[in-house]
Amino acid sequence: MFFFVSSLTDASENARIVSSANSSLTIQVQIIQTNLHTYISEKNEVSYYQSLVLAVPYNGDITLAGLHLGTLKAFSQTQQFPLAGGRDKIIEFSDPLFVRGEKLITVYIFPVTPSGVYDEVEFTVQFSGTTSNGKAVSVDSPFEKMLSASVLNYEQSKQFAQVPIQSLASGAESGPFAENSEWIKIEINKNGLYKLTGAQLDASGLSVTGEASASIHLYNGGGVQLPVLNEIERPLFEEVAIKVIDGGDGIFDSNDYILFYGESVNRWVYETAQTVFKTHSYTERNVYWLDVSSLTSGLRIQSSDASINGVVNGSVSQTLDQYTRRVHIEQNNILRRWSDNRISDYYTWYWTNDNNLSFFVSTEHILTDDTVRVILDGITGDTTGSSDENEAINFYVNG
């Protein structure tokens, strides 16, 4: 089972409710080939689908109870990638999303087969859970107006049980902000060691001087953008280790300072299996939060032996004369658009779609007789329906 990212859109697009009961629904969908969306798998196999959004009782589920397929017609779409054959199901359900107490499920209809495309799909779904709870709805609410235009069975969903407010509140993750209402916001845009004096912190509006040095805390949320899907766990705020220079008296004064290592949102991340470059789609700044709380002592940078052979201030039997430098170059200028002007991926941007690209990389103290490893992240092909499988990239250095 895979899951597409789907936004709330017009629920009436080629779909209508044939019959409705408290715990079931029959829907008829007219398939218009030019309106089908495209999904390309990691194997470069393409599937064509149409989707709609249904509300479900929060304490229940949805099952497919019946399916009737229309006439199989010739499929006229231009195909750049091979058609994904042998899909197990015409109808698939997404994992649920919870939107202000509403449990919503996206229904995906896959009408295209290797033999053609069905011009109509009619199916029946059944709901479990509480279907006669009733809810007070303000029709004039802007949010309800959006739901009524996006959820196909909006009228039916008025009888469905919603997620209790207490349940939503209790599921919220606890974090450092629950302990204190006054914070200093610190924004950075580069990797490096940062210094903040007591005078600088006081100038922000929150007085820090005179406080116990141990009560100073620094937090960060990881500097990564939030996942697109609601069901993916959000990164928690974690305390960042800092070094406090206070003259040894344990009191933080205006001339004292703290040191911490800050990271950009666009940076190399050293994972277990590989090193990858992470980018943020919405900001260039990573935010750190500083507060003063005497409930616990703040996290501090610990000293450790950084000598090569474990001997400090002694003889050194090994000398480092080179290291690996990673250089990342990226420009996000264009989205990939198909020949029929559809854009199937709004999150992956590309530098250019030209046949040739030249760029200059500058870095100091290169070992001219060493090896350079180059990794390109891109895609070959076009959006005109070409079936040429011999596409390739030729890469030249100083050539």
Image (spheres, grey):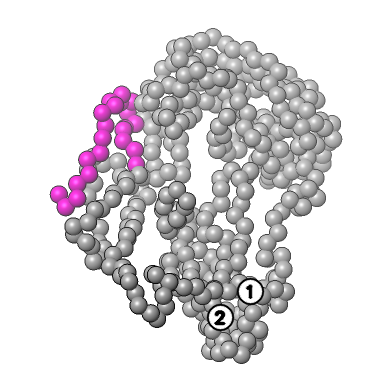
Q: Quadrant of the N terminus?
A: top right
Q: CA distance from mark 1 to mark 2?
A: 10 Å
Q: Residue at x 62, y 82 (%)?
A: 213
Q: Amino acid at mark 2?
A: Val
Residue identified by numbered label 1: 298
Residue sitting farthest toward the left: 399
The kind of secondary structure the magenta stretch mainly shows is loop
Instruction: For the residues labelled 1 and 2, say whether their Cβ atoms are less than 8 Å apart.
Output: yes
In the rendered view, tell whether residue 173 sits above or below residue 77: below
Q: Residue at x 78, y 25 (%)?
A: 23
Q: Nearer the viewer, residue 394 or 315?
A: 315
Q: How many marks?
A: 2
Within the image, what quadrant is residue 152 found in? Answer: top right
**Residue 244 numbered tag:** 2
User: What span is colored magenta in the figure?
Assistant: 378-399
Residue 229 in picture, x, y percent from top left: 59, 43
Q: Is residue 47 visible?
A: yes
